[in-house]
Image (cartoon, rainbow, N blue to C red):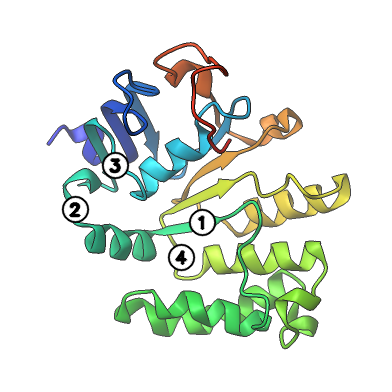
Amino acid sequence: MNDSINNSAISLQSVQYAWAKQDSPFLAIDDLRIASGEKIFLYGASGSGKSTLLNLIAGVVSPRAGSIHVLGQDITRMSNRQRDQFRAQYMGIIFQQFNLIPYLNCVENLQMRVEFLPRDQKQNAVAQIPVLLERLGITNVAQQQANQLSVGQQQRVALARALLGSPRIIIADEPTSALDADLRETFMQLLFELLDERTALLFVSHDQQLLPRFDRVLNMQDFRATAPDTQSQPEVQS
């Protein structure tokens, strides 16, 4: 294996992605590499394929062609079960809508994440829960149901969940889009403060005021195989 691929946290080589029943690829990525510890800001217009790229890297969808190496492993050669296990072990994901289970309290939502971790990570992850709750300032609401929390509190629980197990890669899909300026700033400070220096961060946002915090900026337009055509393209998530 190429040493530069093996040493990268994420490496996409000659990747093409096409929607079902379409001949032409939607995304075409010749060579994209993200180093361990690198903090990447990814932006693009709605429908440009940002979520699709995240799903490719997370192994949720598969490319038509090419290879996707994550931590030196080619996830395109894994079974669905292997990809699920790999994602649970090595990746933390922060969703735009947080995706908390509304009738569970904070601790129970975090414990749900622990259940998906490999056995050898569970004990350390359980020990992390009270530490993260304290660092994120939500110990006082730890027993409240998620649907009783403010937006800012829900977001902190989502951040704690992503950090459990000390993942090597954090994928954040527009996690600040519903926040006001103060909450956004607090979240970004906490995120960067709590990230391990070896953890690669791939952060999607429309908010270019956040750019100075990141090591590198990627524009989805550089990965589009064809120019956007709202008349012919299927509806996609941003």
**Residues at marks 4 and 2, CA–CA distance in whole angstroms:** 23 Å
Q: Choose mark 3 or mark 1, whichever is in front.
A: 3
In this figure, which residue is indicated by the disc labeled 1?
93
- At 45% across and 78% down in the image, what residue appears? 114
Please give the residue where the numbered disc 2 appears in the rendered image: 78
Is tag 4's residue or tag 1's residue first in the polypeptide sequence?
1
Residue toward you, 14 or 39: 14
Whole-angstrom CA distance, mark 4 to mark 3, is 26 Å
Residue 162 image-quadrant placement: bottom right
| Spatial CA span between label 3 and label 1 | 18 Å
Q: Is 39 situated above or below 234?
A: below
Q: In terms of depth relative to the viewer, which is nearer, 13 or 62?
A: 62
Camera-near label (3 vs 2) is 3
- Residues tagged 3 and 1 counted as in contact (Cβ below 8 A): no
Tell me whether the residue at label 2 lies in contact with that at label 1, contact meaning CB atoms closer than 8 angstroms: no
Q: Amino acid at mark 3?
A: Ser
Choose between 190 and 225: the one closer to the eye.
225
> Residue at (41%, 85%) from the top-left corner?
123
Would you say the residues marked 3 and 2 are in contact, meaning their CB atoms lie under 8 Å apart?
no
Q: Gap in Å between the C-alphas at discs 4 and 1?
A: 12 Å
Badge 3 marks a residue whose secondary structure is loop
Q: Earlier in the sequence, mark 4 or mark 3?
A: 3
Q: Residue furthest left?
A: 1
Type of the residue with mark 2:
Met
**Place of residue 37 in the rendered image (x, y in percent of width and height, measured from the top left):** 46, 44
Q: Which residue type carries mark 1?
A: Ile
Estimate the x, y position of residue 160 in percent, counting from the top left. 61, 68
Classed neighbour count for the residue bearing mark 1: other residues with Cα under 10 Å, few (<14), some (14–19), many (≥20)? many
- The residue labelled by disc 3 is 62
Q: Amino acid at mark 4?
A: Ser
